[in-house]
Amino acid sequence: MSLIAILNSLAAQPVAAGQVVPTVKHLDGLPNAVPTALCPCRLFLSGSEEGRGAEGGFSALGTLLETTFQISDLMLWTTQAQGTGRAQYERDLTVYQDNYLAMLRGWRNAGQAQAHVVGFRSVIGLYEYPAQSGVRFWGVLVVVQVQEFYST
């Protein structure tokens, strides 16, 4: 069991926004910038405020280790410069949120025998990528918490 296995399993789950399934980029495939032609795409982020992280501890005096991973999955739909604004994309982004929730219901075990989804947060908004680039995208940020247990 590992964070990489959980990430690979989550990245393999397709989530549609209408008739479109965003391309997934994570780990070694994360782009330095996102051209409009790559949109929509899902980026698994780390090293940011909403990035990957982990908390954990040992249960009582035993050897059972519980770890809770936080995974940020940012879907970039299109640049802010495209179209007429949020109202134009609201339906597609809301459909994506709904489909993501449906995917999480079926992915409760996080693709692992000793792991499960314990929570998530999903927010439609404008997201800058890469940081401090000035390029903003309409998108959905989903932060998923996955708890894993294993004996050390």
Image: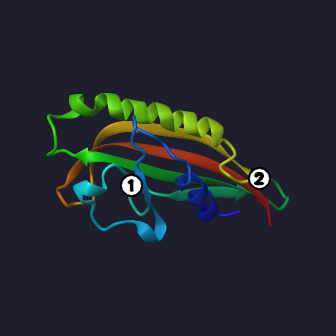
Query: What amino acid type is highlighted by mark number 2?
Result: Ala
Q: Is residue 89 above or below residue 21?
A: above
Mark 1 residue element: loop
Q: Is residue 80 left or right of residue 116?
A: left
Q: Is residue 97 left or right of residue 12?
A: left
The residue that mark 1 highlights is 49
Query: What amino acid type is highlighted by mark number 1?
Result: Glu
Within the image, what quadrant is residue 43 found in? bottom left
Residue appearing at x 44%, y 34% in the figure: 97
Residue 40, percent from left and from top: 33, 49
Residue appearing at x 55%, y 48% in the figure: 13
* Mark 1 or mark 2, whichever is nearer to me: 2
- Farthest bottom residue? 28
Q: Earlier in the sequence, mark 1 or mark 2?
A: 1
Residue 88, percent from left and from top: 22, 30
The residue that mark 2 highlights is 113
Q: Is residue 15 above or below residue 150?
A: above
Which of the image's four quarters has the N terminus?
bottom right
Within the image, what quadrant is residue 83 found in? top left
Label 2: how many Cα within 10 Å (few below 14, some 14–19, many 20+): few
Residue appearing at x 47%, y 67% in the figure: 27
Mark 2 residue element: loop
Q: Is residue 108 left or right of residue 39?
A: right
Which of the image's four quarters has the C terminus?
bottom right
Q: Is residue 68 above or below residue 122?
A: below
Within the image, what quadrant is residue 94 found in? top left
Residue 92, percent from left and from top: 34, 33
Label 1: how many Cα within 10 Å (few below 14, some 14–19, many 20+): few
- Farthest right residue? 62
